[in-house]
Image (cartoon, grey):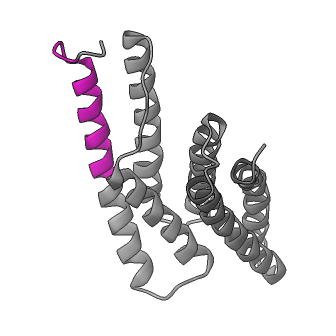
Amino acid sequence: MNIANALSLGRILLVPCFFWLCYYSYSRVGAPEFVVWARIVLVMIFLSDFLDGYFARRHGQETALGGLLDPLADKLFVLTSFILLAIFDRLPIWLAMIVISKDILVVIGWALVATILGRVEASPTRTSKWATAFQFAAVVATVFSFPVPYPLIVNVVAAGLTLVSVGQYFLQGLRLLSPGNSSS
């Protein structure tokens, strides 16, 4: 296992730690030590995300395993964070519903396309990457209690980019399934 894959795996293992620390910081009044630790783990998650991309691209450590672990780590982090933060009214429920619904729809869509075609190579769109970045930013703004209007702006941009990316994935799926597509 190379460094990039180890960092992605480490990020996956940090997600439950982040969840637990946020849960206790938001469910117990006056538990500042949990907030501090949640912020530290959040920074570790972001550093590992940056570093795994750095090692994968700059040092030729891109692998099929990394192609699975990195997006899995991102999705686990985003979904876990959005569910938890929405439950504790830290993030708006409408944003959590948009983000979670998008991920569910994309997984169902790619599963259908893969079933019909026998295989499909999923590649994230540029908009989807930006949407994920703004989803991460929404979590950071919430956990670090950034002042208004920053969280609102980030939330609206994250929602907009997430909705646009759903449309792009839908169009990709239609193109793959079109009769003129040479790969079908």
The foreground one among 3 and 26 is 3
Residue shown at 76% from the left, 50% from the top: 6
Of residues 58 and 70, the one drawn nearer to the viewer in this rendering: 58
| Position of residue 65 in the picture relative to residue 104 (left or right) | right
Q: Position of residue 32 (x, y in %)?
A: 79, 83
Q: Quadrant of residue 46?
A: bottom right
Is the N terminus in the top left, top right, bottom left or bottom right quadrant?
top right
The one of 60 and 72 positioned closer to us in this rendering? 60
Specify the segment rendered in magenta: 163-181
Q: Magenta stretch: dominant SS? A: helix
Residue 150 vertical placement versus 38 (above, below): below
Magenta stretch holds residue 164: yes
Q: Quadrant of the C terminus?
A: top left
Residue 78 position (above or below residue 146): above
Q: Position of residue 79 (x, y in %)?
A: 57, 50
Residue lying farthest bottom? 147
Q: Quick check: is 21 in the magenta stretch?
A: no
Residue at x-position 83% and y-position 80%: 33
Residue at image position (60%, 65%) is: 50
Q: Is residue 26 visible?
A: no
